Image (cartoon, rainbow, N blue to C red):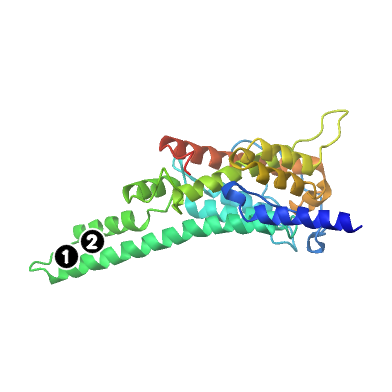
């Protein structure tokens, strides 16, 4: 009994140790099976035919009694794409807020992962706030210098120019592409060593999004005739191995694989996304995965165009 206890302690220690390193080259989780707060029986979700644009599709159900809402996640993801090739940062980060709730709902140990992800979203938000404050200061300084000059010209045209200048300075972190442009112009991106730039931080979130997209996609697949549905534990392990594992050390990968063994069973995920059957889960998760994939692909192109897919 003593040996088994020590072995368990050692495993938990390894998971905790590498959990604090999650997005850098680390990982950690120990999912609980089914927190009482989420044991909710949901009414069947009406199945609908889903097209690529989601037009005419009924909104997803809001699940009472839990923090994570699949409907909110989908709404933020669908609000993120802008123009033809860009992603708005506010809804993108808001979608991560929901994904953090999703991870936290899988058990107390996974909170270490969600904390690491949350720290990344905080970095980008702090950078955006700082840039906005700097822009406001520059505008005030410019206005003061204009007022102190010998000639002060105030006209609707000048006001419009000032407004445009304020917009360009204050909204460097409006979208992924504007953030990349802003940080490159201000020398904030280092291609040789680790920094807390928004671009590097986005890359870490970008990699994690691919893993979650793959996992939810596999979780949404129905079993073929004569086959059983595979366990979430196996699916999570496999999708991790073909995505995030490539950016992690051997020790982190092994810690992750041990942690996946405690993944909750499928019925728990049904309750979490507010459905009752695998068929309903397929409809809901396919919608979410489609939205995630569009955001991911846009960010992939933006980062690739600027040689940022391998930032240290």
The structure residue drawn at horizontal position 80% and vertical position 50%, both measured from the top left corner, is: 264
> Relative to residue 174, is residue 161 drawn left or right?
left
Which one is nearer the viewer's eye here, 27 or 71? 27
Which one is nearer the viewer's eye here, 269 or 235? 235
The residue furthest front is 3
- Position in image of residue 189 (x %, y %): 39, 48
SS label for mark 2:
helix
From what the image shows, is residue 51 above or below residue 82?
Answer: above
SS label for mark 1:
loop
Which comes sooner in the sequence, label 2 or label 1? 1
Dots 2, 1 in contact, CB < 8 A:
yes
Q: Quadrant of the N terminus?
A: bottom right
The structure residue drawn at horizontal position 66% and vertical position 58%, both measured from the top left corner, is: 112
The structure residue drawn at horizontal position 79% and vertical position 46%, both measured from the top left corner, is: 261
**Crowding near the residue tagged with mark 2, few <14, some 14–19, many ≥20 C-alpha atoms within 10 Å:** few
List the residue tagged with mark 1: 154
> Relative to residue 236, is residue 94 drawn left or right?
left
**Crowding near the residue tagged with mark 1, few <14, some 14–19, many ≥20 C-alpha atoms within 10 Å:** few
List the residue tagged with mark 2: 159
Report if residue 23 is visible in the image: yes
- Position in image of residue 259 (x %, y %): 75, 49
- Position in image of residue 18 (x %, y %): 66, 52
> Relative to residue 48, is residue 245 drawn left or right?
left
From what the image shows, is residue 188 above or below residue 228?
Answer: below
Which one is nearer the viewer's eye here, 243 or 209? 243
Instruction: Report the number of discs.
Output: 2
């Amino acid at each position: 009994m003593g040996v088994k206890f020590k072995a368990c302690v050692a495993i938990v220690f390894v998971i905790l140790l590498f959990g604090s390193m999650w997005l850098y080259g680390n990982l950690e989780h120990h999912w609980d099976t089914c927190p009482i707060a989420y044991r909710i029986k949901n009414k069947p979700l009406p199945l609908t035919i889903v097209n690529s644009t989601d037009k005419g599709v009924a909104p997803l159900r809001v699940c009472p009694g839990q923090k994570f809402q699949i409907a909110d996640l989908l709404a933020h993801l669908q609000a993120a794409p802008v123009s033809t090739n860009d992603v708005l940062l506010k809804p993108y980060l808001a979608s991560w807020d929901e994904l953090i709730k999703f991870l936290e709902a899988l058990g107390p140990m996974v909170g270490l992962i969600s904390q690491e992800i949350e720290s990344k979203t905080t970095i980008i938000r702090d950078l955006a706030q700082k840039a906005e404050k700097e822009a406001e200061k520059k505008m005030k300084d410019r206005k003061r210098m204009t007022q102190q000059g010998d000639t002060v010209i105030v006209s609707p045209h000048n006001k419009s120019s000032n407004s445009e200048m304020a917009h360009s300075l204050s909204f460097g972190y409006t979208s992924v592409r504007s953030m990349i442009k802003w940080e490159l112009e201000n020398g904030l991106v280092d291609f040789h060593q680790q920094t807390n730039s928004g671009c590097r931080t986005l890359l870490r979130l970008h990699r994690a999004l691919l893993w979650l997209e793959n996992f939810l996609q596999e979780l949404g697949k129905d079993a073929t005739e004569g086959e059983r549905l595979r366990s979430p534990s196996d699916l999570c392990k496999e999708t991790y191995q073909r995505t995030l594992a490539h950016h992690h050390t051997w020790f982190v990968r092994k810690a992750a694989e041990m942690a996946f063994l405690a993944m909750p069973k499928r019925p728990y995920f049904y309750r979490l996304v507010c459905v009752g059957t695998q068929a309903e889960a397929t409809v809901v998760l396919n919608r979410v995965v489609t939205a995630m994939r569009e955001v991911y692909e846009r960010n992939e192109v933006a980062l690739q165009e600027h040689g940022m897919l391998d930032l240290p």
